[in-house]
Image (spheres, helix red, strand yellow):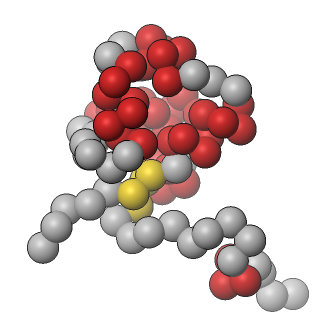
Amino acid sequence: MSEVVYNRIAMLRAERGISRRELADALGVHYQTIGYLERGEYSPSLYLALRIAEFFEVAVEIIFSTAPFPRIGDSSERSVS
């Protein structure tokens, strides 16, 4: 079984206008680490995942998942009233 960790780091960075280098500096990691994380080439430690969530002020589950995130606008993501 492959241990893939999916994430929304790139999306959150883009929404907030933050560069990889700015995020890396805030987290105390090399900017290439952010690229590796975004591409799924590296899974973060629990500590780093929690720090990323803290930086973006969201729950860690908003950023990381063991299953692919639904595409934005996917009808299965819409709530039924």
The residue located at (25%, 42%) in the rendering is 42
Relative to 22, residue 38 above or below: below
Residue 18 appears left or right of 66: right
Residue 36 appears left or right of 79: left
Question: Looking at the figure, which quarter contains the C terminus?
Answer: bottom right
- 38 and 43: which one is in front? 38
Looking at the image, can residue 74 be seen? Answer: yes
List the single residue furthest toward the right.
81
List the single residue furthest toward the bottom.
80
The residue located at (32%, 37%) in the rendering is 36
| Location of residue 77 by image quarter | bottom right
Residue 55 appears left or right of 29: right
Question: Looking at the picture, how far across and down is residue 48, in whole percent?
Answer: 33, 32
List the single residue furthest toward the left.
1
Instruction: Give the total number of marks visible in the rendering.
Output: 0
| Location of residue 1 by image quarter | bottom left
Question: Looking at the picture, how far across and down is residue 2, in whole percent?
Answer: 16, 67
Residue 2 appears left or right of 10: left
Question: Looking at the picture, how far across and down is residue 55, in whole percent?
Answer: 54, 28
